Image: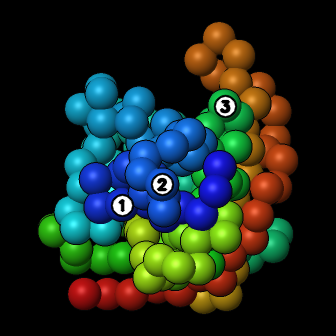
Amino acid sequence: MRSAAIGPEGRIATANGIQDCHPFELWVAGCLRDGAVEFQGDDVVLGEKAAARFAPGIDREKKMAVLGIVERDAEPMRAMPWTSAALLSGVNGREWIALSAKDARIGNAKEMAPRQIRLFIPLDLVVYEAVKEMPDGKIQIVSLPVADGRVTAEGRPIMTLPFKKIAV
């Protein structure tokens, strides 16, 4: 694929129009088809069904937040150039972990203006309270192997992002 960026509808925009799909675009399209995601401007907001593919939690030994991702979804998540993450409280009356990419352009898309994209993952209150107790600093994103609908082993780290708590 040549120069590209993700557009507000989740489509890959390129200098030559819509081209090959980016792994994150395909992942979002699958969630959209299931009615498990919506777009709010440049934000991708997951519903409960899509959020079930993530396992937020904490690593008490490392004193940091952890976000597990079902193994088959790890590549689409890794393909997006995420730059930070935040624990959000009070956004649309919910708690969230939000991943942010300051510049979601793909490849050599220098002729296009940078485009920020954020992925909002809803949290239940129990998980939010546990993550809230961790210090600001970093969140580790891990790939979780799954068999027969269950996580079968400890997660394999795929990236670490700066992480902070934000109350709105």
Question: What percent of the width, then of the height, locates residue 9?
Answer: 28, 53
Residue at 68% x, 75% y is 161
Q: Is residue 113 above or below residue 14?
A: below
Residue at the far left in the pictured view: 93
Residue that badge 2 annotates: 16
Question: What percent of the width, then of the height, locates residue 83?
Answer: 61, 78
Residue that badge 3 annotates: 72
In front: 126, or 104? 104
The amino acid beneath tag 1 is Gly
Q: Earlier in the sequence, mark 1 or mark 2?
A: 1
How crowded is the residue under tag 2: few (<14 C-alpha within 10 Å), some, or many (20+)? few
How crowded is the residue under tag 3: few (<14 C-alpha within 10 Å), some, or many (20+)? some
Q: Is residue 146 left or right of residue 157?
A: left
Question: Which mark, residue 7?
Answer: 1
| SS at circle 2 | loop
Residue at the far top in the pictured view: 148
| SS at circle 3 | helix
From the image, state whether disc 3 or disc 2 is nearer to you: 2
In front: 84, or 55? 84
Q: Are marks 3 and 1 in contact (CB under 8 Å)?
A: no
